[in-house]
Image (tube, rainbow, N blue to C red):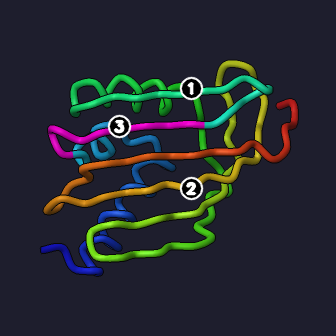
Amino acid sequence: MVDRRQVEQLLDRLYAARVSGRLDELCALFSPRASFRIAGASDGKPIAVSAHGREEIRPWLAMMVKTFKLTRHEILTTLIDGAQAAVRWRADINSRITGVMVTTELVDLVEIDGEAINSYTEYFVPIAAKAG
């Protein structure tokens, strides 16, 4: 059974690793059989990612860390119910490829199994873009 403090600590590690771009630490937070989904839109085009298992998840996380730098990260709301959490957050997402910065709001739905993420779903909506 997972207690609230365990969930909070895992979420703290998740966002610290994501914001700092520490790929190995980020990947280690997912269970070997985790599911991973991202859904949103950018430039009016839908984006959907789905991966199962740490081996499929790692390349997506590597691409995200390599391509996007997060700044001004802010947790807006966290709801925890047992081993499940919903986190609403905002960040400036800077593309290392195009130089464009997009302020984005995101909602992550996270399920914990033991001390690892078993299911991760992220929804995002760009709010405002600025050329870099």
Left or right, 21 with reference to 41: left
Name of the residue lying farthest toward the top: 97
Percent across and percent down for residue 99 are 76, 26
Percent across and percent down for residue 30 are 24, 45
Q: Give the quarter of the image for residue 26.
A: top left
Q: Residue at x 35, y 73 (%)?
A: 8
What label sits on residue 9 in the rendered view? none
Q: Which element type, helix, strand or loop, lies under badge 3?
A: helix
Q: Which residues make up the magenta segment?
A: 31-39
Mark 3, Cα crowd under 10 Å, few <14 / some 14-19 / many 20+, is some
Q: Give the quarter of the image for residue 90.
A: bottom right
Tag in front: 2 or 3? 2
Identify which amino acid the numbered label 1 is placed on: Thr
Q: Residue at x 40, y 32 (%)?
A: 61
Q: Nearer the viewer, residue 93 or 32?
A: 32
Secondary structure mostly seen in magenta is: strand
Which residue is identified by label 3? Answer: 23
